Image: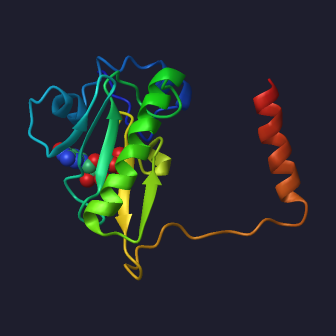
């Protein structure tokens, strides 16, 4: 009997080796216009549409046309194209919605809240006092921050 591994059980190395074209997501279908979405922007490399369940009205999702799972496997060229579109749309969304600020969010892997496994960036218009809590914060123990920074720096060097 075959056991289909769930996203929660999936180790990161396995997730990164998955072939994205085989793992069809709802965003693949939106991109091919097979299911409807309120598309707000499109160019050669990127595509943007309204989130169906917005944090606030005007919440936009920006995706690359070339599929990837998330920031852990997207290549630099597609990432830079995505960032260009995010910047453009952040300004447009803020002005269109009369927002006071904008959050740019990206959830990578289930532990970080990713539910659709196709790279997407959230552009969320924010209003003073809208009371959406971003994330609770922790404190570092004495000396811990230095150790953590060193760990990350040695990864970058390897
Ligand atoms: P994630 O947690 O993966 O970063 O967020 C996925 C987002 O996709 C959610 O905010 C959810 O509301 C949005 N979403 C899920 N299904 C659909 C859909 O069919 N159409 C649109 N426009 N957005 C969707």
Q: Is residue 57 above or below residue 4?
A: below
The one nearer the camera, 35 or 144, is 35
Image position, residue 7 (x, y; %): 40, 37
Left or right: residue 68 compared with residue 96:
right
Residue 26 lies in what quarter of the image? top left
Image position, residue 114 (x, y; %): 40, 45
Look at the image and tell me in which quarter the C terminus lies.
Answer: top right
Image position, residue 157 (x, y; %): 81, 27
Look at the image and tell me in which quarter the N terminus lies.
Answer: top left
Residue 120 lies in what quarter of the image? top left
Q: Is residue 116 visible?
A: no
Left or right: residue 59 compared with residue 120:
left
Kindly identify the residue that appears in the image at 40 percent across and 72 percent down: 100
Kindly identify the residue that appears in the image at 49 percent across and 21 percent down: 77
Q: How many marks?
A: 0
Kindly identify the residue that appears in the image at 8 percent across and 40 percent down: 36
Q: Is residue 90 above or below residue 10?
A: below
Q: Is residue 70 visible?
A: yes
Kindly identify the residue that appears in the image at 40 percent across and 73 percent down: 132
């Amino acid at each position: 009997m075959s056991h289909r591994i769930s996203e929660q059980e999936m180790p990161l190395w396995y997730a990164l080796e998955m072939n994205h074209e085989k793992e069809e997501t709802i965003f693949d279908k939106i991109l091919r216009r097979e299911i409807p979405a309120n598309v707000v922007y499109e160019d050669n490399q990127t595509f943007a549409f309204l989130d169906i369940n917005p944090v606030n009205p005007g919440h936009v999702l920006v995706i690359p046309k070339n599929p990837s799972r998330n920031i852990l496997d997207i290549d630099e060229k597609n990432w830079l194209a995505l960032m260009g579109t995010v910047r453009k749309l952040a300004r447009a969304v803020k002005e269109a919605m009369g927002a006071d600020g904008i959050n740019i969010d990206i959830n990578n892997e289930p532990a970080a809240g990713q539910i659709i496994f196709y790279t997407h960036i959230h552009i969320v218009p924010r209003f003073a006092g809208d009371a959406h809590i971003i994330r609770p914060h922790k404190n570092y123990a004495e000396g811990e921050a230095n150790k953590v920074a060193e760990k990350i720096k040695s990864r970058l060097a390897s």
